[in-house]
Amino acid sequence: MVRYRILWCMKMLPSAALIKAVSGRADAERTGMALLEWNDKMSVGVPALDEDHKKLLALVNELHSVVRKQSPPDAIERVMRDLVSYADYHFEAEERLMRLARYPDLEAHQRSHEELGKQVEAMGQRFLREGPAVRIKMFDFLSDWLMRHILGEDMKYKDALAARARPKAVPETEA
C-alpha cells in the first residue's frame, strides 16, 4: 500500500518533500511519531500561512493518532471538526491575501478549496454510515490532499504574495 501511494504521489506531484513525507509513513505508523512533518520546502514565504500549514499538518497527525489508536468515533469526530474549522479559517485568510495580491488564479484556487470541502463532507457522511472501516481512507485522503495542495497549488501563489509583501522602492528626490 505504501509503495503504491509513493508511486501515485510521484505521478501527481514529483516533489522530493512529498515523497519523503509519504515514504516515512511505515516508520511513523510503527513508532507512533508524527507522520507528516513540516520542512522549509513547504514554505509559501508568508509566515502566517506557513504557521497555518504547520497547524493543519499537526491536526492531520492528530487524526492519524486517533485513527491508529482505534479511538472512539467521538474522538475522531472532534479532531475532524477541529481540522475542518481550522481549514475554513485558513482558506479564508489565504484567499484574502491572494485577493490583495491580485493573484490571477484565485478562482481556480478557491475551487480547489471548495472541492475539498465537498469531499470532506462526503467522507464525514460516509464515516457516520460505515464507521471504523472508513477511518484509514479518511486519513489517507486528507494527508495526501494536504501535502499535494501545499507543495503544488500553494506554491503557485508564492511569488505573487512575496512580491506584494516586498516594500516598493521610493525614488530619491533631488535636494
Image: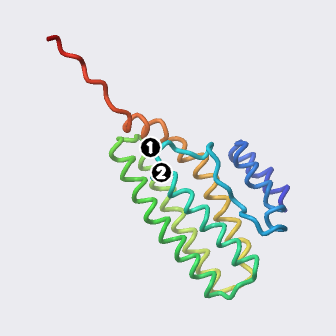
Name the residue: 51% across, 55% down: 51
Residue lying furthest top in this view? 174
Q: As displayed, is residue 156 above or below residue 124?
A: above
Coordinates of residue 164 in the picture (x, y in percent)? 37, 37
| Residue at figure coordinates x 61%, y 58% from the top left | 146
Say above or below: 118 vs 145. below
Q: Quadrant of the N terminus?
A: bottom right
Q: Nearer the viewer, residue 29 or 110?
A: 29
Residue 90 position, x and y percent, is: 46, 60
Q: Amino acid at mark 2?
A: His
Secondary element type, mark 1 = loop
Q: Which residue, given by chain and number where applicable, does mark 1 sit on?
A: 105
Q: Position of residue 73 (x, y in %)?
A: 65, 87
Task: Examine the rendered structure and indicate whether residue 127 appears above or below residue 43.
Answer: below
* Residue type for callout 1: Asp
Residues at discs 2 and 1 in contact (Cβ within 8 Å)? yes
Residue 168 in the image, given as x and y percentages of width and height: 31, 29
